[in-house]
Image (spheres, helix red, strand yellow):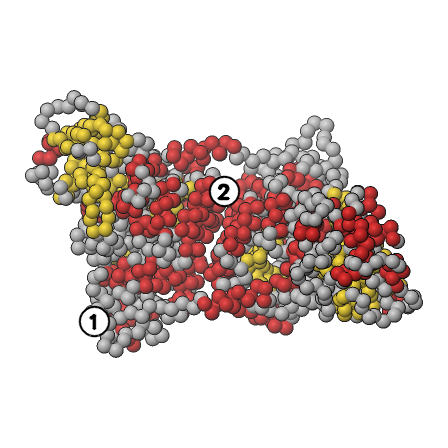
Amino acid sequence: MSDCRRQWNREDELPVYLAGPITTGPNQRKSFGMFSSVEGAFESKTIDFDNYAVGRKGSRTPRSGSQERLLDTGDPVGKTSSEAREGSLTNSPEDTEDARTGVEVRFSSVKEGSDGKNERLLIKGGRVVNDDQSFYADVYIEDGLIKQVGENLVVPGGVMVIEANGRMVIPGGIDVNTCLMKPFLGTQPVDDFLQGTKAALAGGTTMIIDHVTPQPEDSLLEAFECWQEAADKKACCDYSLHVDIPQWNETVKDELELLVQEKGINSFQVYMAYKDMYQMTDSQLYEAFSFLKQLGVVVLVHAENGDLIAQEQKKILGMGITGPEGHPLSRPEELEAEAVFRAITLGNRVNCPVYITKVMSKSAADTITQARRKGSVVFGEPITASLATDGSHYWSKNWAKAAAYVTSPPLSPDPTTPDHLHTLLACGDLQVVGSSHCAYSTSQKAIGRDDFTLIPEGTNGVEERMGFVWDKAVAMGKMDENQFVAVTSTNAAKIFNLYPRKGRIAVGSDADIVIWDPDRVKTITAKLQQSASEYNIFEGLECRGGPALVLSQGRVVYEDGKLQTQQGTGRFIPRKPFPDYAYQRVKFRNQVKSKQGVTRGIYDGPVYDVVPTPKYITPAPSAKTSPTSHQPPPIRNLHQSNFSLSGAQIDDNIPRRSGHRIVAPPGGRSNITSLG
Amino acid sequence: MSYQGKKNIPKITSDRLLIKGGRIVNDDQSFHADIYMEDGVIKQIGDNLIVPGGIKTIEANGKMVIPGGIDIHTHFQMPYRGTTTVDDFAQGSKAALAGGTTMIVDHVIPEPGTSLMEAYDQWRQWADEKACCDYSLHVDVTHWNDSVKQEVDNLIKEKGVNSFHVYMAYKDYYQMSNSELYEVFTFLAERGGIAQVHAENGEIIAEEQARMLQMGITGPEGHVLSRPEELEAEAVFRAITIASQTNCPLYVTRVMSKSAADIISQARKKGNVVFGEPITASLGTDGTHYWSKNWAKAASFVTSPPLSPDPTTPDYLNTLLSSGDLSVTGSAHCTFSVAQKAIGKDDFTQIPEGVNGVEERMALIWDKAVTTGKMDENMFVAVTSTNAAKILNLYPRKGRIAVGSDADLVIWDTDSIRTITAKTHNSAAEYNVFEGMELRGAPLVVICQGKIVLEDGNLHATSGVGRFIPCSSFPDFAYKRVKARKQLAVLRAVPRGMYDGPVSEFSMSRGGTPSASARTSPTKQPVRNLHQSGFSLAGPPTPDDIPIRPAGRRIVVPPGGRSNITSLS
């Protein structure tokens, strides 16, 4: 045991992924900041971590008898001291390997019955990592809620104790984009809510937000209930639902209102692609954005230019290209960037927060970055696939493999894309990571074996999501562990108004907790995955970092590679509208943005008489005014008839222009027709 | 110059002309030389020219001699709801000549649903009757179908039109959908035409207009409030995307805002073939005047896209023009009288759109860009004349001073200062959007078709002498790169073995009706039906489903067969 401790301490001291630029010496403290206890770190800290940094005082106490104390009460004093003492030791890969056994579960004194076993839990000696700070503390959990966080907790006897041995204790991941029930031409993905949530938990994700995808003409409400019913039966972790709006009309509005106010939905997806099916025109999008903004929901946008895609698909099929390579060829990344730009423009006009789902290309991500620089309220969600692999596989000679990568927008064939997206994720320009997990079997994909436009779209990724962000961003030094928590969990909770119930380790939050092992190295393969699909698009990739233990609703559901899930335990988490994270700025802008007309004298000069030739008049009114404003036509007609009779304008103006705001001051203005 | 107005006499004297002692400024270099022209064509350039005796000689005294300006965007005599713009081809081209512009390119705007060819003939007739300078025509494509396609084809092949204008704004009227734009661009790319776009998002504008009117904003400020520059930038971005997909050269008319110009320069940096055209108004003034208390003044600024209320815009656009990110300048001269503008006195959406600028164009660019040191005189020639000639495929006949080029020349006075005012301008409009602006630089002498039309401040324009200059397709300036890319951009399928694994059962009926049209083009219908029926009869398909595969697909099975493609990686 003490061996283990020593090793994890060392590893904490100089993690492999951060070891490069840092040398042992006085500089250590600065570089490590608050994330770990480095020798001398606690003497001169100015920030007050008394409440959190349990190791602070302990760092100078001798570690005598630490083993026993650890076993009994989990007092972290010993650990930190040992760490400080051994801080100068160098790290080595072998130590890292051994250290993986660091998490232990045991009962402190009396073995309790299995029923009480999961209700009360103590995680001892972990380093709690939230999105804002990391600190050493024990976490006590009761009835699926975090009851206490701190050191020397007073807890009832007989609780199950999880010895974290200084490993990271992070809020469980939230996967904001899964499609576990998305029908395609009558077939369902092979990963349903059971299979999908199992995979999620195995990857350290303790909550998913699935997309309800009604077909056009379907009732949104019925679709929602259908999804909820299926999920309640099968889901192993908490879930929530986005509802996709397949088409825009008046009846949809009522359903939306109901969903927001009574069903706890605060996010809806609209499509700019899938012409003649889900796609909305710009006018519809404008109306949808305006309406959804009033409801206070987050608008998710599938951003691709569907019109152009349809044209390109036609062209490419015409050229005889029918294989999966036709998919990226017909959906070049420009079309994604264009639609992102348009969606942001719409969002700006309506003053509505916009959330771009599935950011797959550099140019789309750059467009989001630029818009954020200009102050737009826009969020970008790269997915596991775009963060870990690229689109070169579409050209694979193996049809089944190539087809497995088909998703929309497609993976970019540019191999530098994942790196670029990770960079933007690390600097905060992209905010959340989803997986867009939508797994179809090869035989389902084969529906499109002669026509790539019929290949069901979707890739796996719910299980690999957290691991790849750690591997490609944190282990590469792009991102720190707090930002890791932010992009995998906290930001999602904030955007969708789940915070701080989810996405944070704090008293009162749900006990969805992951003990993260930064050094676990795993080779991804379809043989070992939880998902039921035959292919894994990350096949053969090595991934460093993974969950050592996963708690969902206060129960251990994953430990050392073993899943202990219970079907149907997942609860639907309702979400309230107007999430602060998205809407606070919008509210202020609303107040600032009101526009006013100019008060002018009344124009009293000559007016050209418009000849009502049918040739010009018929199209012109509809062209120059929108259909919703019925004011102009009567005005114009009155105007016309008046003018041809008398030519006089001054007095006629006033009764005609009800509701218009031009105010003539008493005494009148100077003649407004004067030149200059 | 006593022969003013008498058509017969000047023919003898002014057909031969010598400009002595000038500094010739082309877009590539400047040099001192004399120019001798005869029959409207430049015959000799050099020192100590041997010329016939008794010809008229103009002493340039070292002043700049530049190719006459080409205003690539005008709307003279444009019909609008039963009225026409106050500047017809005579008035308009007179104003052009007074400003040093010796060629204009006007827009033919057929009403949606009417024939392009008829409209073209109509414009030709109007212009041939009245124009005082050479002209050419763009044709606006206001709707799209197969007969329009045919007409476009004829216009390119037989009528000397190489640029076609499409609209992304004016919903339910001129506006085209993305699919239509794609088709138009594809067609133009095949035939060597230039796609011009009016880039504004018409759908959002319609929504915003309705909102403004509901809020009770009915004055000209509603125009700019309902057409924020974002919508311009968005449409420019989209147009560039479509053009890049179709590999078609794109020309964005009326770049009015910084953000739109930025999008163009970014796209050019990425290699897109796109040209931006700021207009006199956007280079010289800004949109703050929309809030003028004087309704008539505010209304005179109404044009689309609107002038940006950001007062730093003109400066910024001049900078991009100097750096070459924007390529040509037009005026979008389209003038309405105050009475005509007053059609929209109670509703800004009814105000006829258009500003003046054909006369002020050259002087304004000189004043804002050259005298401020942003641009040199060669670049000045490029953006006012040469680039336009290149895009229209008229180079080097127009846009250059060279032996064999048309004798459209301007002797430019860099120091004269004049104040713009509606009282002295040559347009018939009561308002001038540049009113009161002091501009340095003006034409001293203007020679059009080898005849002196402006000298000593007197204009001697003759109505009806303007010739139609046909433009040929595939201008090198735009198409050379496009052609090279066409060869590179050939897409190829991956040769694979046949997929012979199981195929999941799927129904086209459940939710299939809409998805069928969504996921494949209409032309693919028979293919899918075959596939379906073959499947439902036989269950899992056998390897001999080759007949099911549509003819013309390129999947190649090598002799001996490939490895089984369903094997896991």
Where residue A210 sits, quadrant-wise, is bottom right
Q: Residue at x 26, y 65 (%)?
A: B294
Q: Callout 1: helix, strand or loop?
A: loop
Q: Are marks 2 and 1 in contact (CB under 8 Å)?
A: no
Name the spot of residue A556 as percent of width and height, x first: 82, 61
**Which residue lies most toward the right here?**
A110
Where is residue A578? Give x, y as percent.
58, 68
Name the residue furthest left. Answer: B2
- Say the numbered circle drawn on residue B245: 2
Q: Is residue A310 visible?
A: no
Closer-to-camera residue (B156/A477): A477
Question: Residue A648 shows which numbered tag?
Answer: 1
Residue type highlighted by circle 2 = Gln
Query: Foreground: A206 or B463?
Result: A206
Q: Is residue B291 above or below residue A368?
A: below
| Nearest to the observer: residue A535 or residue B446 | B446
Query: In which quadrant of the rendered image does the C terminus of chain A lie?
Result: bottom left
Badge 1 sits on which subunit? A
Q: CA distance from mark 2 to mark 1?
A: 55 Å
Q: Who's the residue at 17% across and 55% down the image?
A: B423
- Residue at screen point 61% across, 41% down: A416
Up-down relation of residue B77 to residue B187 (above or below):
below
Residue A614: percent from the left, percent from the top?
A: 31, 60
Chain of the residue where label 2 is placed in the rendered structure? B
What's the residue type where badge 1 is placed? Ala
Which residue is rendered at x = 25% and y = 35% of the image? B67
Left or right: B453 as drawn, with respect to A82: left
Q: Is the same chain shared between marks 2 and 1? A: no
